[in-house]
Amino acid sequence: MTFDRKIEDAGLERGVSRLTPERIENTLKQVIEGEAGAKLKLYAETCMRCGMCSEACHYYMSHEGDPSYSPAGKVHQTLGKILRKNYKVTADEIYEMAQIAYTECNLCRRCVHFCPLGIDTGYIMSMVRRMCHKLGVTPPVHSGHRSFPFRYLQPDVAQR
């Protein structure tokens, strides 16, 4: 699955420019193995990617059923990738994960009500945000930028 929807963001760019492979690996391990405990890994490893959560997600529904916008797809592209690569992800991959966690999930947790296993994708995305924050890769909203909600609208929506 290729990531073909990169948004140019000064906060994310500035953050990834300061990352080193060692810092990425150490921070991810600290959060996943320390702060989050077994719950986070268990959720990621238990998800069957059945898609029952998809229609609960308004991002998925507003992107014509693109599976990469489904809650399971977001977990696969973020925490799943971190675990599959044994914490050895690149700065560019951290950028993609931050974009997904901050701009493609509002942590509404509707998906958890549709998951037959009760996987809390909102919790997973909040922990991905936590990892990105600890790495210093955050969008401007976290520094008080007032226009944040409008920066990520599709061009046809922003012009209305």
Image (spheres, rainbow, N blue to C red):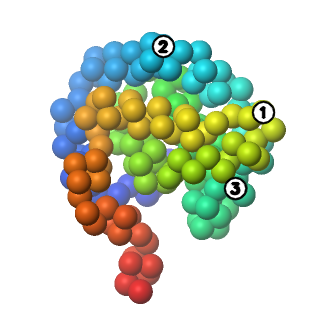
The mark found on residue 51 in the picture is none
Q: To which quarter of the image does residue 137 belong? A: top left
Q: Amino acid at mark 3?
A: Ala
Q: Is residue 50 left or right of residue 14?
A: right
In the rendered view of the protein, which quadrant contains the N terminus? top right
Q: Is residue 68 visible?
A: no
SS at mark 1 in the image: loop
- Pointer 2: residues within 10 angstroms few (<14), some, or many (20+)? some
Disc 2 target residue: 33
Q: Is residue 109 visible?
A: yes
How many marks do you count on the picture? 3
- Asked if 90 appears above or below 8 in the picture, the reply is above
Residue at (65% x, 64% y) in the render: 61
Residue 153 or residue 13, whichever sits in front = 153
SS at mark 2 in the image: helix
Q: Which mark is first along the chain, 3 or 1?
A: 3
Residue at (39% x, 15% y) in the render: 30
Cα gap from disc 1 to disc 3, whole angstroms:
15 Å
Residue 31 or residue 83, whichever sits in front = 31
- Pointer 1: residues within 10 angstroms few (<14), some, or many (20+)? few
Q: Are marks 1 and 3 in contact (CB under 8 Å)?
A: no
Percent position (x, y) of residue 154?
Answer: 43, 72
Residue 94 or residue 90, whichever sits in front = 94
Q: Are marks 3 and 2 in contact (CB under 8 Å)?
A: no
The mark found on residue 117 in the picture is 1
Q: Is residue 39 left or right of residue 49?
A: left
Percent position (x, y) of residue 19?
Answer: 23, 29
Percent position (x, y) of residue 60?
Answer: 62, 59
Q: Amino acid at mark 2?
A: Glu
The residue furthest right is 116
Disc 3 target residue: 56
Residue at (28% x, 66% y) in the render: 147
